[in-house]
Image (spheres, rainbow, N blue to C red):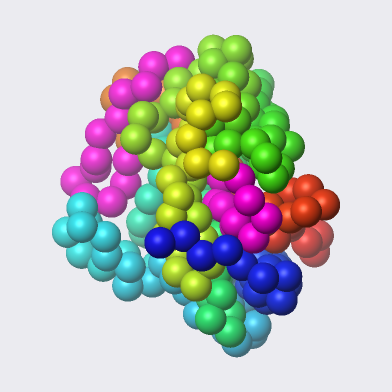
Amino acid sequence: MMELKTATSIDAMHEAGRVVGRALTAVQNAARVGVSLLELDEVAREVLREAGASSPFLGYRPSFAPTPFPAVICASVNDAIVHGIPTGYRLRDGDLLSVDCGAELDGWVGDSAISFVVGRPRPADLRLVETAERALAAAVEAAVAGNRIGDIAHAVGRVCRTAGFGIPQGFGGHGVGRRMHEEPEVPNEGRPGRGLPLRPGMVLAIEPMLIASGKDGYHAAEDGWTLRTDDGSRAAHVEHTVAITESGPRILTARETA
């Protein structure tokens, strides 16, 4: 059942979201050629520890997963779309890295993701990331009371498809609150004016996922968690936790500059 949050609850979620924003900023600042994904996970862990927050990712095990998730960030490199497990892999010049992070603070969860290039970027990667960010911005703009879930989905899909990028079907955003995954589902493609009406008090994790080749195919890697593009093309993933309020959408996971 979907829970509508009070203004006080949304303020509390904003505090959790601020921790996520700090963690993602710290990870991006630490992501350099030669740094391992495990080292980046430790950077995020330290931010959570300092804030007195816990990780909703660590130990999470949905029905599809063969093992509990072992880290506090998802670190997805190049052709990995989402759910990448941090390993000893050391970043290389030009790697495209997507980092997803969550924080639980005082019983409330924030969830957000960023994509960026390590070292010297390829123009195609910059365009992919920029399009993902535009899709997220368009979706946030559509997250207003009186619209519907389909309006958010359509906003993401329109930006992505117009730019020629693929969208992994079956994966998208979700409600968030006391748990990391709550109702409703928030697809990354859909028809405007359809789906659940948006009401003040709803809090959604909106997360566009793009595939560079324009194809939608993906598969699960051997670890049972990481999703990779079928054709080896690169992917980007960005996300914000957004509250629907009487005065418009409120981003709860805005990044803080270091």
Q: Is residue 44 left or right of residue 15?
A: left
Residue at 27% x, 65% y is: 61
Residue 88, located in which quarter of the rendered image?
bottom left
Which quadrant, please, contains the N terminus? bottom left
Instruction: Answer with the quarter of the image where residue 202 lies.
Output: bottom right
Q: In this view, does 110 lie to the left or right of 169?
A: right
Q: Where is residue 207 in the image (x, y as percent from the top left)?
A: 54, 43
In this picture, residue 221 sits left or right of residue 247: left
Seen in the image, is 192 located left or right of residue 69?
right
* Residue 13 among magenta residues: no
Q: What residue do we see at 60% from left, 57% from top?
A: 203
Q: Does the magenta stretch include residue 211?
A: yes
Query: What residue sits 68% from the left and 55% below the top?
Result: 200
In the rendered image, residue 107, in percent from the top left (x then y), is placed at 53, 81
Query: Camera-side residue: 206 or 54?
Result: 206
| Quarter occupied by the C terminus | bottom right
Magenta-drawn segment: 198-227
Q: Can residue 25 be seen in this view?
A: no
Given residues 61 and 156, the one toward you in this image is: 156
Closer to us: 198 or 141? 198
